[in-house]
Image (spheres, grey):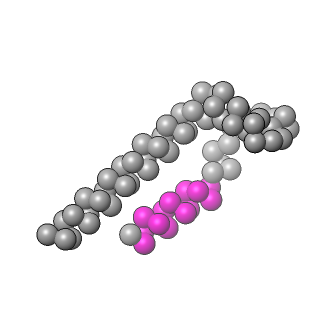
Amino acid sequence: MKHLSLALATLALSTPAFAHPGDHHEVTGVTETVGHFLGTPFHLALLLGATVVGFLCLRAVKSARNKNSQ
């Protein structure tokens, strides 16, 4: 579990490296931020990928707990 936590923390800290090019000065508030993230295919793909990875991690942890309890 410690390895998974470390991997996820490292991935979360490296997100600026995945940033797409472009100016983000128009994104100044919460509404603009949500609109920017939900209005671009790049961000939607990242959101979908993060959701899938999170689901798979949760499933793996539950599976490991079930094996340990038997």
The magenta stretch is 2-14
Determine whether 7 is above or below 69 in the image. Answer: above
Quarter the N terminus occupies: bottom left
Identify the image quadrant of residue 34.
Answer: top right
Taking the spot 66% from the left edge, 49% from the top edge, the residue there is 17
Q: Magenta span: helix, strand or loop, mainly?
A: helix
Image x and y of residue 33, in percent: 73, 39
Image x and y of residue 55, in percent: 39, 48
Q: Does the magenta stretch include residue 9?
A: yes
Q: In the rendered view, does 25 fall on the left or right side of 56?
A: right
Image x and y of residue 44, in percent: 57, 33
Taking the spot 21% from the left edge, 64% from the top edge, the residue there is 66
Q: How many marks?
A: 0
Q: Does the magenta stretch include residue 26?
A: no
Q: In the rendered view, does 54 fall on the left or right side of 46?
A: left
Image x and y of residue 53, in percent: 43, 47
Determine whether 49 is above or below 67 in the image. Answer: above
Taking the spot 62% from the left edge, 55% from the top edge, the residue there is 14
